DNA sequence: CGTGATTTTGAGTGTCCTCAACATCTGTGG
DNA sequence: CCACAGATGTTGAGGACACTCAAAATCACG
């Protein structure tokens, strides 16, 4: 499990494409390496957002908690992704969501937020990459909004399967899927069962494969 | 109905705070003035996103259309707001949503997107303002996401009333409210009726006032 | 004062959620 | 290799909520 050094990770981080080596080297200096185990909290909503984390190894789930402990996953960041860039790079002082390591080990590099903000300010190419990245996130989130308003769990699950299971795919737990789709585990179970009975997916030992892409497509688009 | 000249509008546009006068003057040159009436389409989803619009007079609704013609309002931009900054400033080539003028007249200034992008690239203070703005939008949209997942129409309507009607407030039509809250007009009507009967709001000739802030607050937080 | 849009209300339906019981899987230690 | 415990998955029943369709009432405006 090699832990890449800060500089080589930075140069391969999509968000930082376009920054010259010197700028990145200046950031790499004060970097810290942090290691987490599955389930560990990286930060919690309300914590000061004074650190920028980049995933080196493993992955991290960003989520919010609602009434009754129900969770909504906002995103999952794996290698070379930046956690909650909006909170840290826009001047937010506190995190708006929780972050939790998904794998053991999950290795993160941490950078002082003000240093990163400074580098972004003074490196036009970097600023451009950050803007493009935030814009893309904005578009994604809006797509998710209208999926929640305009379609049901069936549609959203079908879309998930089409995206992840053209080839055999190891399903997350029903709880994880539910948090991703904005529902509860029982409903995920029922819908998966429905799809299986309809012959649209194959499902053995938590491995799914889409077998009738056409029908799932039809469903995900709402008939 | 004075139409401000492009430069003075630009200098007072929040998104462009921090740019020096010369930069803005360079943008103001190629600006066009466009006038719309209530209901006119400014652009539609799928249109090329090669123009940046800033509202000078009136307001513009950004929305998406789902199955059965149901609409979801993503945002309403009024004076000095920039329309769909994410599409135009992040390198998107097409608009992801529709935009429609809400008032007669609605006056917009239009700027070539590549010019604006260029200015943003080369003016660090501008880039910083754009990043902060996009980050704020990101946070807002995530708040909306979890409101949709974790709470019902009643909660969302209560939150709307608390935000807009501490003082008497002219209600939009039920259809408009429904598009804002992610539901249908009939439900808005019923919920407003409930609140009225409970004595939580006063409602005369489409003007609402919150009369029992405490109860609405309780509801909007889910008991 | 009439016409078209909007609001209100009723009735019926479907989806999702909750709670609870039961089944299955996974990994551990005997 | 088996037995067990805890986690996860499945299924049933009941209820809450939002949506649809349709009719009636009200409003806005010329």
Image (cartoon, coloured by chain):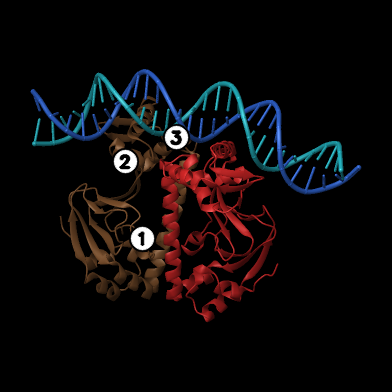
Chain colours: A red, B brown, C blue, D cyan
Q: CA distance from mark 1 to mark 2?
A: 23 Å
Residue A73, x across and y down, in percent: 55, 49
Q: CA distance from mark 2 to mark 3?
A: 36 Å
The local secondary structure at tag 1 comes to: helix
Query: In the rendered image of this protein, does residue B118 appear above or below residue B88?
Result: below
Q: Identify the subunit bearing mark 3.
A: B
Badge 2 or badge 3: first in the primary sequence: 2
Badge 3 is on which residue?
A: B214
Q: Identify the subunit bearing mark 2.
A: B
Work out whether residue A102 or residue B77 is closer to the camera in this orientation and state it: A102
Tell me if residue B198 can be seen.
Answer: yes
Nearest to viewer (mark 1 / mark 3): 1
Q: Identify the subunit bearing mark 1.
A: B
Q: Is residue C6 left or right of residue D17?
A: left
Badge 1 or badge 3: first in the primary sequence: 1
Q: Are marks 1 and 2 on the same chain?
A: yes
The local secondary structure at tag 3 comes to: helix
Q: Are marks 1 and 3 on the same chain?
A: yes
Badge 2 is on which residue?
A: B69
The quarter holding residue B208 reads top left
Tell me if residue B168 can be seen.
Answer: no
Q: Residue at x 29, y 71 (%)?
A: B115
In the rendered image, the residue lying farthest to the bottom is A22
* Structural crowding at the residue carrying mark 2, measured as other residues with C-alpha within 10 Å and reported as few (<14), some (14–19) or many (≥20): few
Badge 1 is on which residue?
A: B87
Query: In the rendered image of this protein, does residue A186 appear above or below residue A111?
Result: above
Badge 1 or badge 2: first in the primary sequence: 2
Q: Which mark is residue B127?
A: none
Work out whether residue B28 or residue A138 is closer to the camera in this orientation and state it: A138
């Amino acid at each position: 499990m090699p832990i890449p050094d800060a500089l080589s990770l930075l140069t391969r981080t999509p968000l930082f494409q376009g920054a010259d080596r010197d700028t990145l080297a200046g950031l790499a200096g004060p970097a810290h390496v942090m290691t987490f185990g599955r389930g560990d909290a990286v930060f919690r909503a309300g914590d000061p957002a004074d650190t920028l984390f980049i995933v080196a190894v493993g992955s991290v789930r960003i989520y919010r908690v609602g009434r009754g402990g129900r969770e909504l996953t906002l995103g999952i960041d794996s290698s070379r992704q930046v956690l909650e860039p909006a909170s840290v790079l826009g001047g937010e002082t506190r995190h708006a969501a929780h972050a939790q390591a998904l794998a053991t080990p999950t290795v993160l590099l941490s950078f002082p937020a003000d240093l990163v903000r400074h580098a972004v300010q003074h490196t036009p190419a970097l600023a451009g990459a950050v803007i493009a990245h935030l814009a893309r996130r904005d578009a994604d989130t809006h797509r998710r909004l209208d999926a929640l308003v305009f379609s049901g769990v069936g549609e959203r699950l079908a879309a998930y399967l089409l995206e992840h299971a053209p080839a055999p795919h190891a399903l997350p737990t029903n709880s994880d899927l539910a948090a991703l789709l904005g529902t509860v585990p029982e409903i995920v179970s029922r819908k998966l069962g429905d799809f299986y009975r309809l012959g649209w997916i194959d499902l053995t030992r938590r491995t799914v494969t889409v077998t009738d892409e056409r029908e799932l497509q039809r469903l995900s688009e709402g008939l």
